[in-house]
Image (cartoon, rainbow, N blue to C red):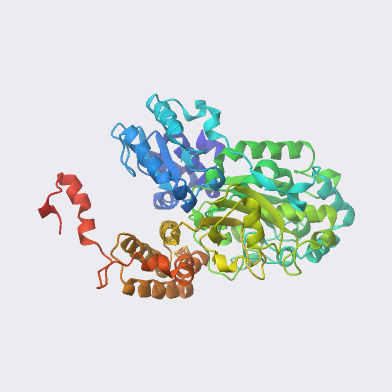
Amino acid sequence: PVLQRHGADASRLLQILRDVQDTLHFIPPEAVTCISSHLGIPRDSVEGVAGFYSFLSLQPAGEYRVLFSDNITDNMLGNRELMQYFCNKLWVEQGRVSEDNLVSVDTTSCTGMCDQGPAALVNGWALTNLDQNRLDLIAELIRSRKPVADWPPMLFEVVDNIRRKDTLLGDAFESGSAIRATLTRGTRETLAEVDKANLRGRGGAGFKTASKWTFCHAAVAEEEGSVICDIGGNPERFIVCNADEGEPGTFKDRVLLTSYADLVFEGMTIGARVVGASKGFLYLRGEYRYLLEPLEAVLKRRREAGLLGDNILGEAGFSFDIEIHLGAGAYICGEESALIESLEGKRGRPRNRPPFPVTHGYKGRPTVVDNVETFAAAAKIGLHGGEWFAAQGTPQSTGTKLLSISGDVSRPGIYEYPFGVTVEQILRDCGGDDAHAVQISGPSGTLVSWQEFGRRIAFEDLPTAGAFMVFHRKREMFAAAHNFTHFFAHESCGFCTPCRVGTELQKKIMDKIAGGHGTPADLEELKHLGGILGSMSHCGLGHSAANPVLDTLKKFPGTFERKLKALAFEPAFDLDGALETARKITGRDDEWAHL
Ligand code: SF4
């Protein structure tokens, strides 16, 4: 039935694998063979894709797979201790499957619930606000083999936590109003309004949206030397909404898709009208699996209301529809070219650029990839015009920005501010008393120390995709940098050597320092590695993978120095530690089993 549902299109491979994983809890060799012959692609390719995404498993992973979110904010809320408590309750070792193949427990990268952590996923479904009582209940449900669909709903409750609204979230929005305004105004005029608004991509890079849409509209797509055109002589184009918000500490798209999905889909439809696309995709991160059915329901309602499908709102020839594509746990798919690869059913590996997706995107056709918040803002511009939008913010950063605030604050959640707001003001509003650092825009962003709290959220000062993680002065910032090095080593796609090896070495050195074996030479090595990662990696993940370490070394050198106990050089490779597995297997822990 899974294969029948998806047809024989190879670009459905990832969605097929997701369905098999959901049904069988892993992807057995027989399923690989079956998928390979159904789609007409080699077994190796199927296994290659299945092996790339962390939510897919080629080995049995237990009937219940519990993955604890392991962002630094989860650590600060005690997720590691809770995970150990849970493992003890279920008699299972972290990273292993229980002997009866019932359950496995491990960590995963941030699941986007930092405002209601500690969080986890069970068979892909988000669990929030974990404590010992909830884990007792979950352990009981697992032992009694109760299907996850029948678990108490309160375990899966996710709240929006909107703490401050401005022009994006503040006014009520009538479905279809922005499309109507666009049709009345005209396509060129609407593009001119987006240009006048100076809307810039909310994913962090800040590329001007009107320019992206213009390039896509003007592009001529080529494939193997021939131009692909539809009957009207125009190349086929696509609109893609990037809802793969995997940057640790970010959860604003979760809230937009939960309570403002109409705004997002309306923005995509306006974008489609401007560039001439008839097909759109929402790439939804796997961690937000629980949003799939509610979002499908919104799409259905919009089709019934004539806001999607053929001849939208009676406009002859204006046809556009949206398909939701689920990710499967790969941070790199937030990079737009990797996302397109993933949409095509492949591993999410960043492409060489140029050419850029606006000319050679999905299936080689011109494609606009924009962030969820960007499309929501575009809908508001479609409705109210560019001048209205540009009246807020700063000249280079117009409009407002959604921030996902977590960490040491008394009021975590979503805050919408006009661009230009200071870090100090935000800390006052969210209850970040006695903060001494804020990690802006996640691990790949910027660490701001207390001396810099006068700085502003804006493309010209502190650009951000939205994460705002706050650290109290009692926190050792080494722990945050250490956590982030593990994140990057885990999420490196392995395509290029500087990043694949560099992130792993960086993690090992940080482990060594954390273990009390660091020397000043290790700090020099970290700086050296940072230079290599920043200059020689293939994509943005590698370029920014050393940011947290370099920022922390610069702004909080003491947090490293306090850990440097050894004065003489020690090798990064811990030979005694490497023998731990052998000790466990042989059951020995005597003096002679150590070096
Ligand atoms: Fe992959 Fe890292 Fe290279 Fe990017 S920099 S392509 S994530 S290995």
Q: Nearer the viewer, residue 534 or 483?
A: 483
Q: Position of residue 106 (x, y in %)?
A: 38, 44
| Figure check: 442 above or below 159 | below
| Figure check: 147 above or below 416 | above
Quarter holding the C terminus?
A: bottom left
Asked if residue 493 can be seen in this view, the reply is no
Outermost residue on the front side: it is 434
| Figure check: 31 above or below 439 | above
Q: Residue at x 34, y 33 (%)?
A: 89
Q: Position of residue 237 (x, y in %)?
A: 69, 58
Q: Position of residue 27 (x, y in %)?
A: 40, 41
Determine which quarter of the picture holds residue 272.
Answer: bottom right
Outermost residue on the right side: it is 184
**In-image side of 581 versus 173 (left or right):** left
Q: Residue at x 13, y 53 (%)?
A: 593
Determine which quarter of the picture holds residue 55.
Answer: top left
Total labels drawn: 0
Q: Residue at x 51, y 56 (%)?
A: 472
Asked if residue 503 can be seen in this view, the reply is yes
Determine which quarter of the picture holds residue 435.
Answer: bottom right
Q: Nearer the viewer, residue 105 or 31?
A: 105
Q: Position of residue 465 (x, y in %)?
A: 61, 59
